Structure formats: structure tokens, C-alpha cells
Image: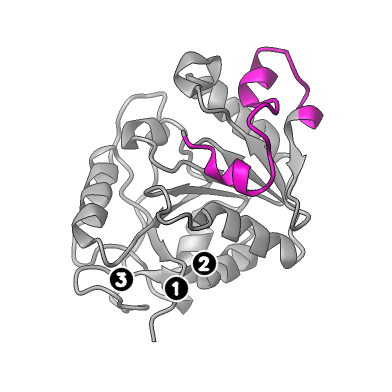
Amino acid sequence: MIAASALFGLLVSTLGMVVLGGRTRHRVVSDATVPAVEPLPVSATRVNSVSPEFDITPIDDVIDAAISSNVTRIMLTGDEPSNGARPLAVNIARRLSLRGQAVALVDLSTSQAAARTMGVSKTAPTIADLIEGRATFAAVAARDFATQAEIVPGGSTMDLSPVSTPVERRNVLDFVEKSYEAIIVDCTEMVPEQLASLMDTDAALLVAVDASQSERARQRIDGLRKAGLADMILVSETRAA
């Protein structure tokens, strides 16, 4: 497996690192069960400045880099989409699928918006059912109605299920990853500490950012850094003119 640093390295060389500029980077070691993410070099190149505070790269550029670097696990965090917009994780999974990648979207968000968007019903079996032995993976994984991508719903009652255990969830992600060229893990609205418990050194962390809500974006980024997630790529669906 190619480490996530390959994706970061490719973005640095062709796009530039998409993080808050000018901050000191360092390795943060937290609880032993939470893998630390190696620090990565920061490029001074500005990629696609849509905010005076930080740089954001278009999601299509990230997809290009992900395919070129063979990164197999992408963790996506951010706010719930507003005004009924399609979840960014769905757009990433579908575009990867349309470019010939065998891809699955694992929806670990509370709303399960990605699963609903891709056609999974509220009564369909989830990862919780898989862990508890009530369903097989074949029953849990569903085909997206629009592409060849697959969707693996996590369920909306994660706090009441064994799937809320970090070890169990990481085991599920490891298991799912073996069957696809790439998996997108939708961690929308997940608290930073919980997200950190799922990260490993082979995963790339994307943070969906709305440049029109800079204060909210800053709070989320600061929260991720405090949780030990210093390396991230800020992404947006739109490309600046």
C-alpha cells in the first residue's frame, strides 16, 4: 500500500500543499491506540486561493493526485451539506468510479446523507449489523444507483453500536479496503478526537471547506490540529476563477 504521503507529495509538487499557510508543523503523539500521522513538508505555493486566510484545492485536482499516487483510503470530514446539496464524499466516489476505479464509500456520518443519496434505504443493513453478525458484507455493501461505486452504510445509531469502538471501526475499514482500489470514508460532523482514532499513516485526510464560512473552517481546522491531525488537504467542490 502506498502511504498517504504519496498523495501529499504529489499535491506539493503539482498543486502545492493545501493547508493553513505559515504554521509550524510537528508530530503529535497521543494515545497509543491512535496512530500518529507523519508531518509533511509545506509548500509555499498557493494553489487556488479562494480565501485570504487559507488555500483550497478543487476536488478534481485531489482526485487526479489520488489516482496517480495510488492512495487507497481517503478520510473526509467537514460540515453537513446545506440546502440539500449532494455530499462531497458522493461526488468523490462517483468521479473515481467513472474514471475506472473500483471504489466504495463507507458512510460513518451521523446523518447517513451519502448512503441516502446513493440509494440505500433507512432499513438496509449497516456496518453495525455486520459487526454483530446479523448480516454479511455482501448484504451490507450496495451498488450506487448512478455508477459502479458501492456504498457501505455505517448506520445512524453509531453511539449505541459496537461500531462506535475505534478498534472495531478500524478493523471494518481494513476489511473493506482489501476489496477495492480506493475507499472514501465519510466522517462528516465527526468530532476530531473520534476521527483521530480512525486515522492511520496510510490514509489521506481531506477537509471540506466552505470559503464563505471562514470562521467555521478555522474552528474545524484548529480542532483537528489539537486532536493530533496536523496534516490535511483543504478541498472544495468549486474551482476559483
Outermost residue to the bottom: 241
Q: Name the residue under label 1.
A: 238
Which percent across, then down, holds residue 97? 72, 60
Q: Name the residue under label 3.
A: 55
Q: What stretch is highlighted in magenta?
A: 111-139
Near-viewer residue (128 or 33) = 128
Identify residue type, mark 3.
Answer: Asp
Identify residue type, mark 1.
Answer: Thr
Apparent side of residue 103 relative to residue 233 in the rendered image (left or right): right
Quadrant of the image for the C terminus? bottom left
Cα gap from disc 2 to disc 3, whole angstroms = 13 Å
Identify residue type, mark 2.
Answer: Val
Residue, x 39% and y 44% (percent of image)?
Answer: 37
Q: Is the C-beta separation of discs 2 and 3 under 8 Å?
A: no
- Residue 62 bears which disc, if any? 2
Near-viewer residue (169 or 34) = 169
Cα gap from disc 3 to disc 1, whole angstroms = 13 Å
Above/below status of 120 relative to 68: above
